Image (cartoon, rainbow, N blue to C red):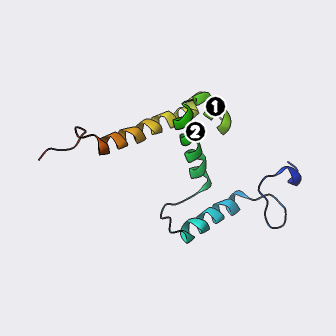
Amino acid sequence: ILDSELLFLNQHGKKLTARAIQYRLKFWAQKNNIPENIHPHLLRHSFASHVLQSSQDLRAVQELLGHSNISTTQIYTHLDFQHLSKIYDQAHPRSKKKID
């Protein structure tokens, strides 16, 4: 890839390394009092989850992530179901809550 084709560049006009991106994410998360361990893969995962939640198009998510096998992308459907189950359990009066 030519440097002129890159989207994110460092102060010298060269491509950002994975470590530089990770460092910047951590720096800005700490500066903004975000307690989670923020890293590039978390952004990728969040992106995929949000696209899947809004479109329900697993093939589109597969293509956007560059997965060659749909089974790799299906992991996000399981995680999406876990998220919905958690919200249901918190909100529904007859969910798995104990009755005293």
Left or right: residue 63 versus residue 9 is: left
Q: Residue at x 78, y 63 (%)?
A: 10
Secondary structure at numbered mark 1: helix
The answer to which quarter of the image holds residue 59 is: top right
User: Which badge, 2 or 1, comes first in the chain's sequence?
Assistant: 2
- Residue to which mark 1 is pinned: 60
Q: Residue at x 83, y 60 (%)?
A: 14
Which residue in the rendered view is the most extreme toward the bottom? 31
Q: Residue at x 61, y 34 (%)?
A: 61
Mark 2 is on which residue type?
Val
Q: Is residue 67 above or below residue 44?
A: above
The image's mark for residue 16 is none
Residue 66 visible? The answer is no
The answer to whether mark 2 and mark 1 are in CB contact below 8 A is yes
The answer to which quarter of the image holds residue 88 is: top left
Percent x, y for residue 89? 30, 42
Secondary structure at numbered mark 2: helix
Q: Residue at x 59, y 51 (%)?
A: 43
Percent x, y for residue 84? 40, 39
